[in-house]
Image: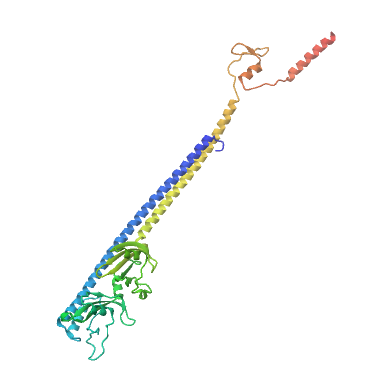
Amino acid sequence: MTNMSPQIKGASRSQLRSLVFAVLLFDLLVIGLAGWTLANSRRQYVIHAEQTTDNLAQVLEQYLMASIRQIDLVLMSVKDEAERSDHPPGVAGIEAHLKSQFARVALLDSLRTTDAKGRLERLDLPGGHPQEDLSHKPFFQHLSRTPQAGLFISHPTRDGAGGAWVITLARRMERPAGVFRGVVFATVTLEQLTRELAQVDIGKHGSISLRGGELDLLARYPATPDQDKIIGDPRISGDYLAAVQSGRQISHFSTHSVLDGQVRTYTFRKMSNPAFYILVGLAESEYLQTWYREALLSGSAVLGLVTLSLVLAWMARTTWLKQMDSQAERDHLIQDLTHALAEVKNLKGMLPICGHCKKIRDDQGYWNQMETYISEHTEATFSHGVCPDCAKELRQEMQARRAEQNKA
């Protein structure tokens, strides 16, 4: 292409740039379209995960509400029975009623009553035996001081020294005229509550957590190695804290878990009466598995298409350059031939020439010296000399003239 004219060179470079630009634009459009499609597809998977976790959180809320109502009905039944009969502690009728009500709720760990002094009412203790004192318990202190108190739900506490974590649900019992009679209370172990949460299908790496009204952790599934240490811990952070502070009943967000590092899409749901916080999360590594395969296939297809376009562009460029080289060679040959033809003029037709002096007659009828005529009609020029024959003849003439002059 070095022998081509500047105009042709410029046109060739412009065409090559246009080809490169077109290929790059095509590749960018393909990559952009694939990226947009994958991003939209991923968003649909996330929306589906949000809907799934929202449904699961709603099911858990309904289950908790139903369980709490069922436990409260049991407490109310015992309360009504005790207030109606007003039996003193240790009466077999109350104990039998407690046992029958306790059997109605599988979630319960215990169902008991106290007297007005906070002493546990039990039939299995003989007369005069010291009874367990529960007057220091928060649920007893609150209910004994609050005549109009409703259902009391405690923070997580240990059931005895080093015992299992439990939450307590309790109601106030009264004698006629509103005199405090004692407390009926039921306990639910957080271990049993965690087992109930485990019945929800959240996948291998999903999670469910339940917190009380003051954000104290009640249960989490799957359990962490140090789960026992974080029961009752109210500390939360990040998007979870923002969801709580927003005041909304339902929120969705995706974030890393500080407990196990899994990235999950969560639904946060707040229960108002009683106050509980439910958090259900599905792991991205699970619900995006199909999307990962789609991304791999799309990426492979895009990579193949881009590679093919680049190969075809390179082949087109190579072919184009070869054509330009061939064109340059042709142009160079034509240029040489044109230059050669420009230096040559041909004499055509029959030229009238004198047989003696060799002058040539032109079209106007004038006789011209042969060299003058040829110079005018061609690019040739003449330099004069004497050929050997003419030189011999000239010598002979000169010798003959000298001989004549000598005779004279």
Q: Is residue 174 left or right of residue 367?
A: left
Q: Nearer the viewer, residue 332 or 210?
A: 210
- Residue 109 in sight from this viewpoint: no
What colour scheme does the image use? rainbow
Q: Give the position of the C terminus as an image quadrant.
A: top right
The quadrant holding residue 169 is bottom left
- 277 up-or-down from 122: above or below: above
Q: Is residue 380 left or right of residue 49?
A: right
Q: Tell me residue 118's x, y (percent).
A: 25, 83
| Outermost right residue | 407
How many numbered discs? Answer: 0
| Outermost top residue | 408
Q: Tell me residue 80's x, y (percent).
A: 17, 78
Q: Tell me residue 382's x, y (percent).
A: 67, 21
Q: Nearer the viewer, residue 63 or 3?
A: 63
Q: Residue at x 29, y 68 (%)?
A: 277
The quadrant holding residue 3 is top right
- 117 up-or-down from 402: above or below: below
Q: Residue at x 74, y 17 (%)?
A: 390
Q: Tell me residue 126's x, y (percent).
A: 23, 90
The quadrant holding residue 96 is bottom left
Q: Residue at x 28, y 72 (%)?
A: 196
- 353 up-or-down from 217: above or below: above
- Residue 37 in sight from this viewpoint: yes
Q: Is residue 33 left or right of residue 369?
A: left
Q: Is residue 34 left or right of residue 368?
A: left
Q: Nearer the viewer, residue 276 or 322?
A: 276
Q: Nearer the viewer, residue 153 or 63?
A: 153
Q: Give the position of the N terminus as an image quadrant.
A: top right
